[in-house]
Amino acid sequence: MTRYDLPDILYDAIKAMGGKANIIDVCKYVWEKHASELQAAGDLFYSWQYDIRWAATELRKSGRMKAVDLSPRGIWETL
């Protein structure tokens, strides 16, 4: 796993949670589903919670996630 896998992982997580979720809950979900992959991912293990925010930005740029100003604070929503 690399940071470049995180946008798809994040998108799938939010979709599985009903299309919108609190950032903390999304991170918990990603950890529950991908802990072993993250633990084996070298430095990504230490930075994935930062990198998942980068992944959210990438999803917004690609039009797969709502813009920050269109969602409540702390909530990520897919389109």
Image (spheres, rainbow, N blue to C red):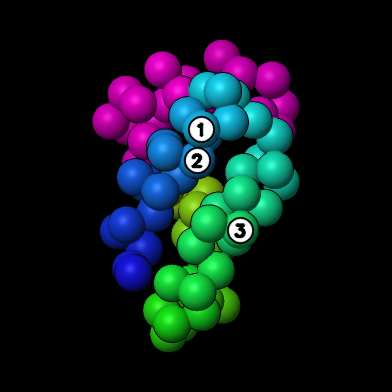
Instruction: Categorize mark 3 by other alpha carbons within 10 Å: few (<14), some (14-19), many (20+).
Output: few
Instruction: Note whether 39 is above or below 17 in the view shown.
Output: below
The one nearer the camera, 64 or 19, is: 19
Q: Of the numbered discs in the image, which one, if any, rests on residue 32?
A: 3
Specify which label sits upstream in the sequence, 2 or 3. 2
Could you say whether the residue bearing mark 3 is in a helix, strand or loop?
helix
Q: Amino acid at mark 1?
A: Ala
Residue in the picture at 46% in, 24% down: 78
Q: Is residue 35 magenta?
A: no
Q: CA distance from mark 2 to mark 3?
A: 11 Å
Specify which label sits upstream in the sequence, 1 or 3. 1
Q: Which residue is mark 1?
A: 16
Where is residue 47? Give x, y as percent: 53, 71
Regarding residue 50, the answer to whether it shows in the image is: no
Q: Which residue is mark 2?
A: 13
Where is residue 29? Give x, y as percent: 61, 49
- The residues colored magenta run 56-79
Q: CA distance from mark 1 to mark 3?
A: 13 Å
Residue in the picture at 55% in, 68% down: 35
Could you say whether the residue bearing mark 1 is in a helix, strand or loop?
helix
Residue in the picture at 71% in, 27% down: 73
Q: Amino acid at mark 3?
A: Glu
Instruction: Note whether 69 is above or below 33 in the view shown.
Output: above
Q: Quadrant of the N terminus?
A: bottom left
Instruction: Note whether 46 is above or below 17 in the view shown.
Output: below
